[in-house]
Image (cartoon, rainbow, N blue to C red):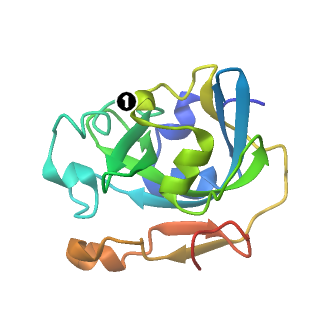
Amino acid sequence: MKKLPRTFYDRDTILVAQELLGKFLVHDSAGVERVGKIVEVEAYLGPHDLAAHSAKGLTERTKTMFGPPGHAYVYFIYGMHHCMNVVTERAGHASAVLLRAIEPVKNLEGRTQGPGLLCRAMEIDRRLNAHDLLSDNFFIAASEATGKISIVKRPRIGVDYAKHWAKRRLRFYIKGNAFVSRP
């Protein structure tokens, strides 16, 4: 599998989010390679986006978002779930793409529809926060498929507090994929 280069992540967040669909998330842990095809994502556009963690500014929790593109931003929510984002655009911009769902490809058990379930199946936790996605054990790879995918655009999930940002169509998923968290 060919890893995505840093330049893939150092672009407009919405474009990166849409182009992550169909790519492969790979995590090699304890000699077991886990692979899932990314089928659903959400874009978070930086501190001006009231739904983004970076809207609260630079904190210990959000410093990875403010870092260079192509790194994993992994956090813990509700005292029970890990979530993984891919940092995008230049350092200091603080934008990222949340991975919401994957289609199991290799060595995955349990459900993968939803960011917490995805991380559980892929064995992703806070130890991978700020991890460089160009490493050999945790990365995103290009798909060998050449066909065009049909992308659905919807509002993000669980961000009602974000005023007009809650209605923005910044959730993207592969149309008709059975592993999307919700239509």
Q: At x 85% / y 50%, what residue is drawn?
A: 145
Residue 104 in view (yes/no): yes
Whether 163 is drawn above or below 122: the answer is below
Q: Quadrant of residue 162?
A: bottom left
Give the class, few, some or many, for how many residues have Cα within 10 Å of label 1's Cα (few <14, many ≥20). many
Q: Nearer the viewer, residue 172 or 14?
A: 172
4 vs 169, left or right, is: right
Q: Quadrant of the C terminus?
A: bottom right
Residue 155 location, x and y as percent?
A: 43, 76
Whether 126 is drawn above or below 151: the answer is above
Residue placed under numbered mark 1 in the picture: 68
Give the secondary structure at mark 1: loop
Residue 153 location, x and y as percent?
A: 54, 75
Q: At x 21% / y 77%, what residue is drawn?
A: 163
Q: At x 40% / y 48%, what residue is drawn?
A: 96
Whether 52 is drawn above or below 179: the answer is above
Q: At x 48% / y 54%, what residue is drawn?
A: 116
Residue 99 in view (yes/no): no
Q: Nearer the viewer, residue 162 or 6?
A: 162
Residue 38 location, x and y as percent?
A: 65, 53
Q: Quadrant of the N terminus?
A: top right
113 vs 31, left or right, is: left
49 vs 7, left or right, is: left
Figure label count: 1
Residue 100 location, x and y as percent?
A: 53, 59
Q: Amino acid at mark 1?
A: Pro
